[in-house]
Amino acid sequence: MFKIAVKMRKALLLSILSVFLLLRLATSPLFGQESPAQSQAPYPGVAEVVPRASQLAEEGLLARERIATLSDTATVRGQLDATLQQLIRMEPQLTDVSEPLARGFDEMRELRGRLADEKGNLENNLDRLSARLSELEEMGKSWRAKKAFWESWQTSLQGPEIRVPLEEFQQAIGTIDDVLRSASIASERLVQLQKDTADLQGKTVDMLSRIESLIRGQTFSKVSHSFASREYLQQFDARLWSQVRSGIAGVEGISPGFLRDQGWIAVLQILLVFILAGFIIHHRPRAEETEEWQFILHHPWATGIFVAFSTLSLLYSEAPDLWQLLLWLPAAFSATILMCALLKNPRKRFTIWLLATFFVLSLALRTIALPLPLYRLYLALLSLVGVPLFLLLAASNQRARQGQLTGFTVTLRIGAAVLLAAFLAQFAGYSTLSFRLIESSLKTVILGLFAFMTVKLGQGAIDFILDQQFFRRWRFFRRFGSELTTRLKNVFLALIVAFTSLYLLEAWYIFDSLAEAWSKLLSLSLTIAEVSISVEKVLVVGLVLYLSIIASWTIRNILEAEFFPRRRFDRGVRDAIKKLLHYSLVLIGFLLAMSLVGVELKNFAVLAGAFGIGIGFGLQNIVNNFVSGLILLFERPIKVGDMIVVDNEWGTVRKIGLRSTVVTTLEESEIIVPNSVLVAEKVTNWSLTSTLCRVAIPVGVAYGSDVPLVLRILVEAGKENAAVLDDPEPSPLFRGFGDSSLDFELRVWISDVRDRFRVRSEICQYIDRRFREEGVEIPFPQRDLHLRSVDAEVIRDLGNQPPGKNSAPSSRFISTGEKGKDKRPAQKIATGRAKNGASRED
């Protein structure tokens, strides 16, 4: 007890000492408790004043240069002045455009587009000015902190024993004050410029709202006089015809100066026509097999004219009205020739020529600035003529198609309905609505035809390029070229359809330009439970996933065509590599798509938890099959092409997926086997390591047969078959004495298990033929039936039956003893015949 007390006293003293030391360390400076002398960081000494003042002067010079750069408002002020001048010039145009001219909407849309551009420029200027102000603010905070440091430093050096260099401190603080003063002046300038920009932006927004109201108001408002009104008829006077003559005379002609400055473009267009036509004629024999290019191969000159005039015409700047009309004529009619070459239906060709003529005629009337009353009358007459004409064409096309309703027939009827609506709107005074219906419908047809022609050209180019000898040298293109061509054509078709749809939005005045339509569609979003799903994100995810799938397909097929044959990989190894590569690339593509749209990958931890709960409740079988599929791919107990037996069904493995395996049976039916069955249950694989197989054929002969002869015939049967291997050689065996036969078995080996049933059949046929030739009998089982008691009436009936009448029962006599010792004869009754020695197949 004494020793225990001593030990406890020592432990208590050690504990008290430890607590004292911890408290002492906690109050020391090492644990963050500063002494009064250290509570404030010391300032540099006197020796540092001059060097630091010199360094501060250099920093001040650089800061003032940066402030001068930030306060340079000449460029921004010049942009604001230009924007102001643009708005001043647009103001009267806004009122002039309100008249419902045939080209009024184009001018209004152009004006709206220009205003939208100016609004965007002003917003960019505001952002730049805000960034400059933010930088100046941060710079001011930094230099004010420096000023406070220098003032505190000067105060810390004051004392009777220290001589403070006041001149250096005054210079340093003066430098800081200059920098702060420059920053303040620059900030005032930028703020004023920011206000001016905001004012111009407000004016631009106001003009945009006004033009939007004009456009919306004119579309469904009565902006002209009705045809039945007196005001409309009074417009047809001498002044109207004077306006017609003035419009024709006012068409801007082709001046010598224009030909001198831009005539080289016309020469270049003519040269391009001859070059393209000659190129097509020269290479026409090589491209005859490309079906999609037949329409340009048969019309090389029209192709040259269309390409030259539709592309190089963009090089002209401020071309005269008459020159623009002359440029449209060859481009429009050459395009019509090419489009008609794509169509076999004569009614479609007639419709295309009709629309092209209407387009050129309308362009000519707008070029001469035909007065509004006459232009309205022109459109109304065309609508009246077009309605019955389109209906007649639709009826004729439907009769030609034996009453079948085709897309062209529906389109003609829709066109007739649009023309009828345009005529009624024009007649009632809704001229703007009529203009938009006709113009947008015409643009829709033209866009559709151009898209169709572009698809044909692009798909033909894909066929032509991939059919070149350079690509045909590669095994990949020879094996998968057809599928690659189909994929590329589908992608090209999707792109053309997407661009055409965007242009249609512009054609129907939903958006002013293609860029605006694209940006507005991408910005569309849907918010679900604080999660924003935009069209842009959906497109990015879809594009990345599609590219990952395409990359997987390309890499897998390149490996299959170029790499695997040279390395002689097993088919199962090939499938395993390709499947793992496919799922890996798709997973990488999915994760990349998620990261591009801003989804953090750590959020998938929650998804993984939910997935684990789902597995626990109802997805055990799916996950079990998935894991089993991975085991099959890595361990490869079976592989594609193996002959297996599953659930007593023979079949060949055709496909190993991650969930199930497809097995084709001998009857060419397909069995879908879950992967878990192939992993957990017993499966017979006849070709896992080798396709070598033994075929055992049981044979039974009658008692008394020549055994050596039977063995010799069996050996001959094995050796005569070409599929039987010589090593190991055929082996006949005498297995024993059966109930009704002598039992033999012929064992032969074949190289391919798939020939097992065929070889067995051929050998059995040979044995049967040779046994009949040699007189060897193949018996069938026989049984003796012994009747122990028979009714007396049956015996009497049997005795009274007339001779020759075969109506007795199958047992006519009674046997009461052993065979051969009966007092009365007994009939042997054959109860059935079976192939002697038949047994269950291996």
Image (cartoon, rainbow, N blue to C red):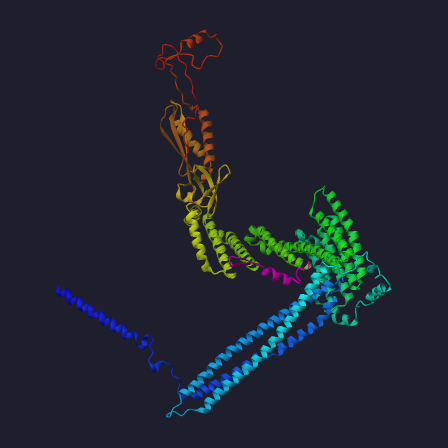
Q: Is residue 408 visible?
A: yes
Whether residue 71 is visible to the viewer of this picture, yes or no, is no
Residue at the front extreme, as displayed: 230
Q: Nearer the viewer, residue 356 or 508?
A: 508
- Residue plotted at (68% across, 68% down): 207
Report the side of 720 relative to 481 (left or right): left
Between 745 and 376, the residue placed more toward the observer is: 376
Residue 320, by quadrant, is bottom right
> What residue sits 34% from the left and 78% below the top?
34
- The image quadrant that residue 39 belongs to is bottom left
Residue most toward the right?
Answer: 238
* Numbered label tally: 0
Query: Which quadrant holds the C terminus?
Result: top left
The reply, left or right, for residue 158 in relation to residue 339 is: left
Look at 38% across and 10% down and name the residue there.
Answer: 824
Q: Position of residue 810 (x, y in %)?
A: 44, 15
Quadrant for the N terminus in the image: bottom left
Q: Position of residue 379 (x, y in %)?
A: 78, 57
Q: Is residue 808 magenta?
A: no
Q: Which residues are magenta?
A: 508-533
Left/right of residue 236 with respect to residue 132 in the rendered view: right
Return the residue found at the far left: 2
The location of residue 299, given as percent across then percent down, is 73, 55
Instruction: Name the spot of residue 63 as percent of width and height, x first.
Output: 52, 82
Q: Is residue 514 above or below residue 175?
A: above
